[in-house]
Image (spheres, rainbow, N blue to C red):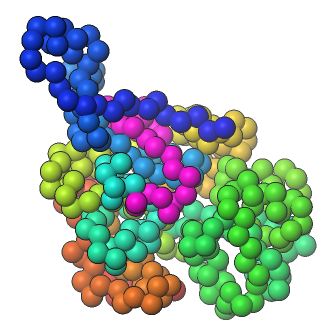
Amino acid sequence: MPVSPPTVRRSAKRFRAGGLALALAATVGLVLSGCAAGATSTNSSGVPLQKVSVAYSSPGASYSDLYVGISEGVFKNNGLDVDLRTLNSSSQIIPALLSGSVDIAVGSATDSAAAIMKGSDLMFVAITRPVFNLEVYTSSDINSAADLKGKKIGLTTPGSQSDQALTAYLAENHMTRDDVQPVYVNSIPGQLAALQSNAVSAILSQPPQAAAALTKGYKALTQLSNIPFPSAGVVVTKDYLTAHPDLVEAFVKSEVQSLQLLQTDQAATIAAIEQYSGDTDPTQAAYAYNFFKNVWSTDPVVDPALINQAFQITAATTGTPAPTDITQYIDNSFVSKYATAAPTGSPTTTPTP
């Protein structure tokens, strides 16, 4: 089972009256309610740490920026005590954010776009993965996309990244979804089981978990990391951004530093992959690192073209028109302070998949 990062305790009201209450507060710390920001311990510089809860899904190598942010002390160095919360599905991330259960959400921009199109006030403050982070794993008799015609393809859930990636992959090879048979199996373990039982001929999945197929006679037909897609956006509500701009800035700064660390400290990153993905095979962890090194953004600015892509995909799925001005949902003011490049493109440069 994946090892979850240490869970940060929630807090309730600060004891204010009486010497006994103050003594208790000094002994057990501050207790605050909800997930509102609150100082707890201090970092090595004596800076009080502020609690921030962050939701993400799929405890695999793709979220290594969050993992090394904790394991290497990046968040703490920037004054944050981060509580990472792994949810069962990407579809749960935005509801958790909107309900106030978490402060920050990291996940596919299409989920955020769908919520915005339903009236939610959300802001994109960083894009940490600007491409699909998947590979196509197949049986040994599949040698090209054309060989997949008529075959069953194992995906996780409808609307998931694997589902959206299938459409994009087929389009790049002059095919449509009508040429294959999508099969939803709920999870990466489900994909592996379906592939190994010959229930499907291919899966769209990610290492290190899915790379286990390579040891059982299957192969990685191709990588999809050359296809632009906002697979990981950092999102907050407008209310939280207004109330806690300092915490959002500290988190974005930490993300920039963690993403840079992924590129320069292979050993620390592989150790984090082994710890948090639940896959302790060093060969598969190294494979995942080499794959994701080309996936993780080094400058997580929010490219309007990628956000427009998310809205267009959602509009095509729901039949609801996309917003005409998507820049109102983008705030690059924090990331621009720390990233080394500005976003490129415009809302009209990325074609609708």
In the image, what residue occupies the spot 64% across and 77% down?
166
Q: Is residue 342 left or right of residue 63?
A: left
Q: Residue 225, relative to residue 175: is it above or below?
A: above
Total numbered labels: 0
In the image, what residue occupies the spot 73% across and 38% down?
281
Q: Nearer the viewer, residue 165 or 338?
A: 165
The quadrant in which residue 21 appears is top left
Residue 252 is at least partly visible in this image: yes
Q: Is residue 54 left or right of residue 22?
A: right
Residue 353, horizontal then vertical, whole percent: 51, 86
In the image, what residue occupies the spot 26% across and 36% down?
33
Residue 298, horizontal then vertical, whole percent: 40, 55
Quadrant where the N terminus lies?
A: top right
The quadrant in which residue 128 appears is bottom left
**Segment colored magenta:** 67-95
Residue 287 is at least partly visible in this image: no
Q: Residue 172, relative to residue 42: is it above or below?
A: below
**Residue 79 colored in magenta in the image:** yes
Residue 113, horizontal then vertical, whole percent: 38, 73
The quadrant in which residue 276 appears is top right
In the image, what residue occupies the spot 61% across and 82% down?
167
**Residue 171 colored in magenta in the image:** no
Residue 15, horizontal then vertical, whole percent: 16, 21
